[in-house]
Image (cartoon, rainbow, N blue to C red):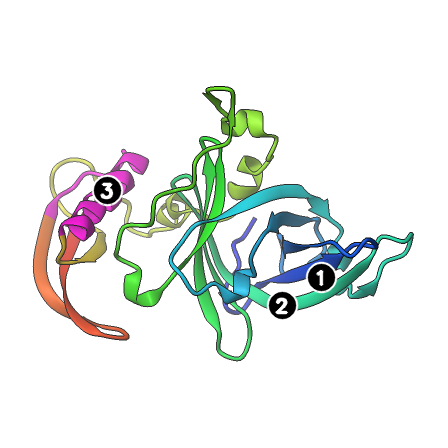
């Protein structure tokens, strides 16, 4: 299944479901195709995903897939099931698998483009917003895993059913398979480069080590031919020096 792009985004909505007794909850629904015709990946969440203002993890609760018409549904539900308020609607234009979860970019309209990371594993299912000026900083500590007694709940035991859905989208390895010049693991002739960068702090440098190591672990077919590093100024909300590391394979 092709991943979403700017020209072919996947719709997503954030709903408030008000029950007949006055209680309510939030549902975050994500389409798995550009036309919104497939069942929707669904999460229960305690905060509005489109209004996160802090770099923190927010727990998600996996819910059964919802019908595609929930992308457009609003108002009173039949069968005395309460009322649906659509609080936000957006387009997913980048959605890829990373270690232990997803990386996503969503345009919520009016120029509000946000990046998210979703983790799913070892009893943890959570989301955080990645802010531009903090993108190279280590993420905050993950929430505590759900446990039964003293035994952590693993992905296989959680009933989330998300692993198959995650692997349905394009991954870094798939993109590599489309390279015209194939990597050569004979000790000569670099053909491709991957660039990493981080701030000049102990934590950030440790995080770039983790990024490089995870990338190489995930791609054992690659052979490192050359590594270059330099210090340069990155321009975002603030200008600050960054370590720039290029790994040639």
Label 2 secondary element? strand
Crowdedness near tag 3: few (<14), some (14–19) or many (≥20) residues, C-alpha within 10 Å: few
- Which of 188/58 is in front? 58
Question: In the displayed structure, does residue 99 sit left or right of residue 77?
Answer: left
Q: Secondary structure at mark 1?
A: helix
Quarter assignment of residue 209: top left
Image quadrant in which you'd find residue 69: bottom right
* Magenta: main secondary structure: helix
- Residue that badge 3 annotates: 210
The image shows residue 12 at horizontal and vertical percentages of 61, 61
The residue range painted magenta reads 202-226
Tell whether label 2 touches label 1 (CB within 8 Å).
yes
- Earlier in the chain: of badge 1 and badge 3, it is 1
Q: Which residue is mark 2?
A: 89
Q: Residue at x 53, y 80 (%)?
A: 110
Alpha-carbon span between mark 1 and mark 3: 38 Å
Query: Does 69 sit left or right of 25 as displayed?
Result: right
Comes first in the chain, label 1 or label 2:
1
* Residue furthest bottom in the image: 110
Mark closest to the chain's N terminus, 3 or 2: 2
Tell me if residue 101 comes above or below residue 52 in the rendering: above
Query: Looking at the picture, how far across and down is residue 87, in whole percent?
Result: 65, 68
Q: Can the viewer see residue 168 in this picture?
A: no
Note whether 120 is above or below 152 in the view shown: below
Furthest toward the right, the residue is: 79
């Amino acid at each position: 299944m092709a991943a979403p792009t700017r020209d072919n985004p996947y719709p997503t909505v954030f709903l408030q479901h008000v029950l007949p007794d006055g209680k309510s909850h939030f549902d975050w629904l994500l389409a798995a195709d550009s036309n919104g015709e497939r069942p929707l990946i669904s999460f229960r969440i305690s905060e509005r995903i489109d209004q996160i203002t802090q770099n923190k993890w927010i727990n998600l609760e996996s819910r059964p897939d919802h019908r595609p018409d929930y992308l457009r549904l609003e108002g009173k539900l039949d069968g005395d099931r309460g009322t649906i308020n659509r609080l936000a609607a957006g387009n997913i234009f980048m959605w890829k698998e990373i270690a232990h979860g997803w990386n996503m970019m969503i345009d919520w309209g009016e120029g509000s483009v946000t990046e998210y990371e979703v983790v799913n594993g070892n009893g943890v299912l959570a989301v955080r917003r990645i802010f531009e000026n903090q993108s190279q900083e280590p993420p905050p500590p993950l929430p505590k895993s759900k446990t039964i007694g003293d035994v952590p709940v693993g992905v296989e035991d959680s009933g989330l059913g998300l692993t198959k859905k995650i692997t349905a989208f394009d991954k870094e390895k798939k993109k590599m398979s489309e390279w015209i010049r194939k990597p050569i693991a004979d000790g000569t002739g670099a053909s491709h480069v991957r660039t990493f960068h981080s701030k000049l702090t102990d934590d950030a440098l440790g995080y770039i080590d983790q990024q490089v190591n995870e990338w190489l672990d995930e791609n054992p077919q690659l052979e490192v031919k050359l590594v270059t590093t330099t210090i340069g100024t990155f321009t975002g909300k603030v200008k600050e020096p960054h370590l720039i590391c290029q790994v040639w394979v």
